[in-house]
Image (cartoon, helix red, strand yellow):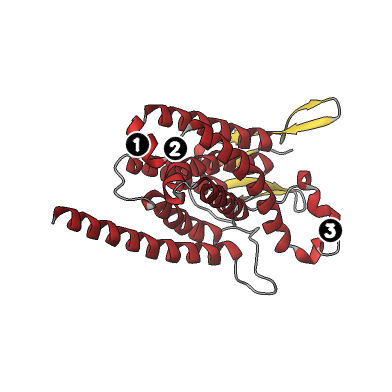
């Protein structure tokens, strides 16, 4: 493989997407990076729960055992939905090759599908356990943003999820085997990694000062939706709604921003009204 270039930063990275092999089985950096994000997020979540007061843990019904059970449900559901989401919008191929849907090792996961699958499965589990979905989402979603930030570097190693050609300061050089020359493109994986890391930091700080349940959850979807909307517009590998020029992730981002902005306003007003009533 030819190295990846960041000429204006003086960086040249020649990374193989295979980390090592066990017998004839290849272990890819992509999977290692994803798991690193999950492990780091769990460590930070564990520390946060331990540092929470007993009153907070009791009122929000949060415990380490509950979080672990939740993760064990959300992860497989997220992966399955990320795969299905990708396959649905490539149905021209997978409709005629149904068995290939199960060949996840060949690539093809969509982060929005993972978010939707994880969120819905987590919400169902919270409902069964009679725990506030808003409270749990407020706690979990900052770490989802951190996982996304770290996970995007798996795209870097795989030389994927980059954007259109550019001459910007952060341009990234990718070797095109067809033309036999380098193309300089937007490193959209890097843009999203930076954005989601900033979202993680911001939401982690705001969590300590939040005024109402659902505040952090709403802000996550608003902030990620806005950043993803603009970043998606730069990408060259977007999923499109069948036979249209509409990018699925841009449309979904706009919908999420609208829905959760409305929800945020409703929850904010209700909290204000409740505060006023208490003062009376």
Residue at x 48%, y 65% (from the top left corner): 254
Q: N-terminal of the two: label 2 or label 3?
A: 2
Q: CA distance from mark 2 to mark 1?
A: 8 Å
Residue 50 in the image: state x and y as whole percent: 41, 27
Q: Position of residue 187 (x, y in %)?
A: 56, 48
Q: In the current view of this chain or complex, which residue is farthest to the left?
A: 280
The secondary element bearing badge 2 is classed as loop
Residue 21: name its quadrant.
top right
Q: Position of residue 2 (x, y in %)?
A: 71, 39
Tell me the SS state at disc 3.
helix
The kind of secondary structure element at disc 1 is helix
Tag 2 near tag 1, CB within 8 Å: yes
In the foreground, 79 or 156: 79
Q: Nearer the viewer, mark 2 or mark 3?
A: 2
Residue picked out by circle 3: 98
Q: Which mark is residue 56?
A: 1
């Amino acid at each position: 493989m030819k190295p990846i270039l960041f000429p204006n930063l003086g960086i040249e990275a020649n990374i193989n997407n295979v980390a090592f092999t066990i017998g004839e089985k290849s272990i890819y950096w992509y999977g290692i990076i994803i798991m690193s994000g999950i492990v780091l997020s769990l460590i930070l979540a564990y520390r946060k729960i331990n540092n929470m007061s007993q009153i907070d843990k009791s009122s929000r019904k949060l415990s380490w055992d509950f979080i672990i059970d939740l993760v064990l449900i959300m992860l497989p559901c997220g992966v399955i939905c990320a795969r299905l989401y990708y396959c649905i919008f490539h149905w021209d191929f997978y409709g005629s090759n149904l068995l290939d849907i199960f060949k996840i090792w060949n690539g093809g996961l969509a982060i929005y599908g993972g978010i939707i699958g994880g969120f819905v499965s987590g919400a169902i589990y919270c409902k069964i356990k009679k725990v506030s979905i808003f409270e749990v989402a407020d706690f979990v979603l900052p770490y989802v943003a951190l996982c996304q930030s770290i996970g995007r570097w798996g795209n870097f190693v795989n030389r994927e999820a980059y954007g259109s050609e550019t001459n910007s300061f952060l341009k990234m050089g990718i070797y095109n085997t067809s033309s036999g020359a380098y193309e300089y493109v937007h490193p959209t994986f890097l843009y999203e990694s930076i954005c989601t890391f900033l979202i993680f930091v911001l939401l982690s700080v705001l969590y300590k000062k939040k005024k109402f349940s659902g505040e952090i959850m709403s802000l996550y979807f608003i902030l990620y939706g806005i950043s993803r909307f603009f970043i998606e517009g730069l990408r060259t590998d977007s999923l499109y709604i069948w036979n249209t020029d509409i990018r699925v992730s841009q449309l979904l981002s706009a919908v999420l921003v609208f829905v959760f902005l409305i929800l945020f306003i409703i929850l904010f007003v209700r909290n204000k009204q409740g505060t006023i009533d208490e003062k009376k």
